[in-house]
Image (cartoon, helix red, strand yellow):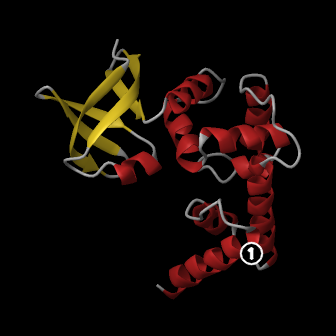
């Protein structure tokens, strides 16, 4: 089994695969959206690897941190979450943000993930609460503040008449480190540009 790889990025393939050369051998690795954006060709990288083996394929999922890989492993061990959905979740939320979402019971935040509807989000919330380490998440933590700001923006966009899909796509592009006012301003700019285009 492959546990980690260190090499040079040769190519990137949309939407989220990189070709990593290690000692003359090229490995196709599936990565999150954030990692894909960071993996410019010729850049050296170190990946923590999860090797997913099926009868018809051996697939490598690559992560820049051990925490991210461990979270991926927890996700795919959860009923109803396969590797593709796990990668979609981690492409939408970093592990700390995901823990915050589960700890605060913010089901609506999970529906931002492509392929996750309300019923699926409710089921995942129950499943993940027993699997993710949510100890130490208390009211007032930075993670709670981030999730509260995101929830405020979602509610504001809904009140303005934007659809679920539009909101979902837009929320994925926002900097969640910003306050709710800045996030809403950026969201409206993105939505306006999309409709104008």
Residue reaching furthest to the right: 139
Displayed quadrant of residue 94: top right
Query: Measured along the vertical axis of the image, is residue 65 above or below residue 173?
Result: above
Residue occupying image coordinates x 61% and y 76%: 186
- Which x, y percent locates residue 161? 76, 78
Most foreground residue, 79 or 136: 136
Most foreground residue, 90 or 141: 141
Q: How many marks?
A: 1
Residue reaching furthest to the bottom: 196
Q: Which residue is mark 1?
A: 181
- For numbered disc 1, what is the local secondary structure? helix
Residue reaching furthest to the left: 24
Residue 15 visible in the picture: no
Q: Quadrant of the N terminus?
A: top left
Residue 56 visible in the picture: yes
- Which x, y percent locates residue 17? 32, 43
Residue occupying image coordinates x 75% and y 42%: 100
Residue 150 vs residue 21: left or right?
right
Residue occupying image coordinates x 73% and y 34%: 124
Displayed quadrant of residue 146: bottom right
- Which x, y percent locates residue 90? 55, 41
- Which x, y percent locates residue 133? 73, 26
Most foreground residue, 85 or 23: 23
Query: Measured along the vertical axis of the image, is residue 17 above or below residue 50?
Result: below
Query: Measured along the vertical axis of the image, is residue 56 above or below residue 145?
Result: above
Residue occupying image coordinates x 41% and y 46%: 35
């Amino acid at each position: 089994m492959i546990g980690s790889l260190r090499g040079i990025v040769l190519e990137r393939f949309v939407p989220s695969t990189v070709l990593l050369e290690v000692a003359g051998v090229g490995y196709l690795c599936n990565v999150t959206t954030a990692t894909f954006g960071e993996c410019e060709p010729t850049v050296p990288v170190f990946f923590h690897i999860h090797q997913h083996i099926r009868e018809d394929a051996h697939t490598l999922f690559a992560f820049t941190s051990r925490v991210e890989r461990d979270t991926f492993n927890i996700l795919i061990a959860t009923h109803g979450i396969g590797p593709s959905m796990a990668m979609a979740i981690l492409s939408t939320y970093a592990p700390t943000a995901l823990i915050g979402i589960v700890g605060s019971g913010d089901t609506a935040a999970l529906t931002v993930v492509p392929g996750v509807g309300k019923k699926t989000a409710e089921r995942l919330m129950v499943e993940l609460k027993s699997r993710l380490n949510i100890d130490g998440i208390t009211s007032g933590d930075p993670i709670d503040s981030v999730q509260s700001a995101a929830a405020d923006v979602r509610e504001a966009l809904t009140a303005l008449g934007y659809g679920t899909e539009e909101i979902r796509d837009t929320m994925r592009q926002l900097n969640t480190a910003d306050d709710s006012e800045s996030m809403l301003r950026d969201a409206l700019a993105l939505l306006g540009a999309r409709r104008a285009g």
